[in-house]
């Protein structure tokens, strides 16, 4: 026979106003098995919790039902209180009388009846609760960081400085990400590379960081504290243990006409190349698609077409026969920091939802460029040495038009969100242009100026007031070549006038999108992503750097459009979460997981098929003498997350999910 | 239908059980509360971790125990806290839906929906719609008689 205590909270007036708490307590107190039922003003307060603890001890309760707010709010509080009084915390449950009753109903009679009904569900259910003990799993104190842009770099350094080992994986030949391409950063105008490269060097030299560049995550297995990650090291065609980064190979490569990815196509590079002079590691890679030797091999030419880099390499580091190799790393936590790409405004799109901006002539008119290309033009390490020269004829543009919200906030073009950083970097571009081209005219077409952030609005005002950028509120309908210039047809909605501007160069502030391939990575990690491909955080306010897979965290622009300060803050937050996880030797998990009754399991493994986590393992069942009986399913307690899909699927009802067993649910339904 | 029949329907307060997932719909219903969205008091929620946990026999059991209607609601497709539980639930209920009528339950008494943690308003709409729909259908115990009488009318 149960000895259940019922505790009804008034929540000040929040519940008490519409629910007759005394009547609820009295009515539930009459149910069989309930030996104690009271109501109190604030159950979650110290005296309220004391009432529960006292009743547990004095009345020897074996079940506690608290009728109060949502269990999402205070379940932990009351379970802790129950545990403090010596009761197993999983014998305490909550009935939601506030969010699901008093706050949504006005009629006192109806609300009280419903509150009694909700209380009965839990009272009947709790009769079938039994004590559970938390699960402890060992933690591998080593983290994997995917992506080595500023977010990944920050996260890796924070974890490594905190005393734990880090594996940092970057798919490009060098770390640094988009931040290494930027000229100056808003709102302080400090040089991007000057603040980034010391951190990159720190990564390379840190004894606790294992850096894998030109590598990608192939597969992920395991669970929080115990992931096994297989990483593909793409063939660089260089032996990185021999190469000393002298650069002779690059100087001698005959193919030097390849558009440089780092310079956004505005500069050229060779087929064997280091992406940029400050690259970390300073080891080249052979671009096999453009290398004469590999092109010859692909065509089946017997003769070796080229081999100049190998000839000049004093260290004999060039290895044309290198293959992709694989390494497996055991880690306890993973941080995803894969960053962003820009919306390609040309006609060709990678997604059916997007349709580009054919009317702006991007790709057709060479002097229509995007924001990152402008960064390269303005950068001292860029193709023009920091001079603003337009790509077509290398003349200094006297009028530059900047267009904001290209792609962003435009559902007709497939993206409804705001990309957040464009207002700021356009103001920065207008400023840099004004500093570098005296007498030049910067015109900005904007929809709204969103400059929320420390010193941000002041920065935009400075671009307008001190650097004389002309801000026009309106959009541009089309652009076309007009002799030497680009004719821009726009509309100034504040004056109500159509605007026609002959520009020497046009810069499009295109939308931020997650990196291509994010969906397949998210699937490998079992984390969810939104319709645009941004990784979903576990809770938008309270768990911003966690994902819904335990042990996988997120940082930077792969979660939503982010600027550098936000990305760094997120990265440090994720790193602190990882260090918090690593601060324990054993990880405690809620025991609300599935169990298989191997006696009745028929071994159909429908559960294995539906389990989203691969938590079902096949186990040989033997009799007392060690003779084989059958193969049955078993749940790996470290992997199971407790969704219960296996239980609803099991044809022989051999699976039970703790906390939500069939008995418990039927008991609640029977209480209707 | 006789006038007395419709009169009993109008005064009838249906009892509806909602089986919802913990992460989306339960939280969405919490949000409806936090936003003080008034709704019909006829729906009582039973919380489960995921729609994937919802056995179709729960629904039948609910009707057996006197429920007049059932709501099943979870995370939107692609939004499941457990990645795929709602997809398995969707397949299960797609099959189950065809069986409901076969076993003598008007399918209009069972509402399947997706309500995310941010859709408090949508949850209130679903509660109100389901309550009105079930109210118009009358108590569940009346169902076999309704079939018989409508059969007579057609004959």
Image (cartoon, coloured by chain):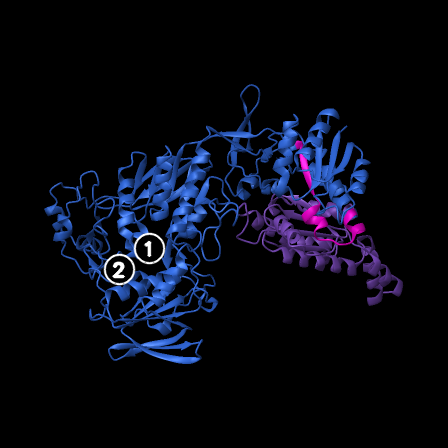
Where is residue A621, by image quadrant?
Answer: top right
Task: Give whichever of A245, A315 is nearer the camera.
Answer: A245
CB atoms of marks 1 and 2 within 8 Å:
no
Left or right, A491 with reference to A173: right
- In the rendered structure, the residue with mark 2 lies on which chain? A
Which tint is chain B? purple
In the displayed structure image, the side of residue A536 where residue A513 appears, left or right: left
Is residue A249 visible in the rendered image? The answer is yes
Pointer 1 or 2: first along the chain: 1
How far across and down, in percent of the image, does residue A322 sit?
23, 43
Name the spot of residue A40 as percent of width and height, x first: 74, 38
Q: Is residue A358 left or right of residue A315?
A: right
> In the image shown, does A574 or B73 lie closer to the viewer?
A574
Give the x, y percent position of residue B60: 73, 47
Q: Nearer the viewer, residue A603 or B116?
A: B116
**Residue shown at 66%/27% (left/top)?**
A87
Q: Mark 1 points at which residue?
A: A188
**Which secondary structure, mark 2?**
helix
Q: Name the residue under label 2.
A: A376
Q: Tell me the shade of chain A.
A: blue
Outermost residue toward the top in this view = A625
Chain name for mark 1:
A
């Amino acid at each position: 026979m149960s000895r259940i205590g019922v505790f009804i909270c008034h929540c000040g007036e929040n519940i008490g106003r519409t629910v007759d708490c005394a009547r609820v307590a009295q009515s539930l107190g009459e149910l069989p098995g309930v030996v104690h039922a009271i109501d109190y003003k604030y159950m979650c307060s110290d005296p309220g919790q004391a009432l529960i603890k006292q009743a547990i001890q004095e009345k020897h309760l074996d079940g506690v039902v608290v009728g109060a707010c949502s269990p999402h709010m205070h379940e932990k509080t009351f379970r802790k209180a129950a545990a403090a009084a010596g009761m197993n915390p999983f014998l305490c449950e909550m009935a939601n009388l506030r969010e699901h009753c008093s706050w949504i109903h006005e009629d006192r009679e109806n609300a009280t009846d419903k509150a009694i009904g909700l209380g009965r569900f839990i009272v009947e259910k709790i009769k079938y609760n039994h004590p559970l003990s938390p699960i402890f799993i060992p933690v591998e104190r080593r983290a994997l960081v995917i992506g080595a842009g500023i977010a990944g770099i920050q996260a890796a350094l924070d974890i490594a400085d905190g005393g734990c080992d880090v594996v940092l994986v970057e798919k490009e030949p060098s770390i640094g990400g988009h931040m290494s391409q930027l000229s100056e950063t808003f709102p302080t105008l400090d040089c991007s590379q000057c603040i980034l490269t010391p951190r990159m060097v720190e990564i390379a030299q840190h004894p606790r960081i294992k850096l894998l560049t030109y590598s990608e995550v192939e597969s992920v297995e395991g669970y929080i504290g115990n992931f096994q990650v297989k990483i593909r090291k793409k063939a660089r065609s260089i032996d990185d243990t021999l190469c000393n980064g002298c650069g002779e190979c690059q100087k001698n490569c005959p193919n030097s006409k390849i558009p440089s990815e780092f310079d956004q196509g505005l500069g050229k590079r060779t087929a064997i190349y280091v992406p940029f002079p400050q690259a970390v590691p300073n080891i080249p890679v052979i671009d096999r698609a453009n290398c004469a030797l590999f092109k010859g091999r692909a065509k089946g030419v017997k003769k070796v077409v080229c081999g100049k880099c190998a000839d000049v390499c004093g260290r004999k580091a060039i290895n044309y026969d290198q293959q992709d190799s694989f390494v497996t790393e055991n880690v306890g936590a993973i941080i995803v920091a894969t960053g962003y790409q820009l919306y390609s405004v040309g006609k060709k799109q990678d997604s059916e939802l997007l349709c580009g901006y054919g009317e702006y002539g991007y790709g057709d008119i060479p002097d229509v460029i995007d924001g990152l290309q402008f960064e390269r033009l303005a950068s001292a390490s860029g193709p023009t040495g920091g001079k603003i020269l337009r790509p077509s004829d290398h003349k200094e543009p006297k009028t530059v038009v900047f267009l904001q919200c290209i792609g962003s906030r435009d559902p007709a073009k497939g993206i409804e969100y705001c990309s957040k950083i464009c207002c700021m970097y356009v103001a920065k571009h207008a400023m840099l242009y004004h500093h570098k081209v005296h007498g030049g005219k910067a015109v900005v077409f904007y929809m709204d100026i969103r400059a929320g952030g420390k010193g941000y609005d002041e920065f935009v005002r400075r671009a307008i007031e001190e650097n004389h950028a002309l801000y026009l509120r309106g959009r541009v309908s089309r652009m076309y070549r007009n002799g030497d210039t680009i004719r821009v047809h726009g509309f100034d909605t504040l004056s109500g006038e159509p605007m026609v501007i002959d520009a020497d160069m046009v810069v499009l502030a295109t939308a931020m999108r997650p990196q291509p391939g994010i969906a397949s990575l998210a699937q490998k990690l079992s984390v969810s992503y939104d319709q645009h491909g941004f990784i979903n955080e576990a809770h938008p306010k309270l768990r911003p750097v966690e994902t819904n897979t335990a042990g996988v965290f997120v940082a930077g622009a792969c979660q939503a459009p982010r600027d550098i300060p936000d990305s760094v803050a997120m990265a440090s937050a994720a790193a602190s979460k990882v260090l918090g996880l690593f601060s324990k030797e054993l990880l405690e998990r809620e025991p609300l997981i599935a169990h298989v009754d191997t006696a009745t399991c028929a071994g159909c493994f429908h559960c294995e098929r539906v389990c989203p986590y691969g938590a079902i393992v096949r186990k040989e069942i033997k009799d007392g003498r060690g003779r084989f009986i059958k193969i049955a399913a078993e749940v790996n307690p470290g992997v199971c997350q407790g969704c219960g899909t296996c239980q609803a699927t099991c044809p022989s009802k051999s699976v039970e999910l703790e906390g939500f067993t069939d008995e418990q649910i039927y008991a609640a339904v029977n209480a209707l | 239908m006789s006038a007395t029949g419709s009169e009993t329907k109008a005064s009838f307060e249906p009892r509806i059980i909602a089986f919802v997932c913990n992460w989306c719909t339960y939280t969405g219903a919490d949000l409806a509360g936090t936003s003080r969205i008034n709704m019909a008091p006829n729906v009582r929620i039973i919380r489960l971790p995921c729609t994937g946990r919802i056995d179709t026999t729960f629904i039948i059991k609910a009707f057996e125990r006197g429920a007049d209607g059932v709501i099943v609601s979870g995370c939107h497709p692609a939004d499941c806290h457990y990645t795929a539980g709602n997809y398995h639930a969707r397949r299960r209920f797609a099959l189950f839906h065809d069986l409901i009528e076969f076993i003598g339950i008007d399918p209009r008494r069972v509402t399947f929906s997706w309500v995310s943690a941010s859709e408090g308003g949508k949850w209130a709409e679903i509660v109100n719609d389901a309550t009105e729909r079930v109210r118009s259908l009358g108590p569940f115990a009346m169902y076999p008689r309704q079939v018989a009488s409508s059969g007579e009318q057609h004959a």
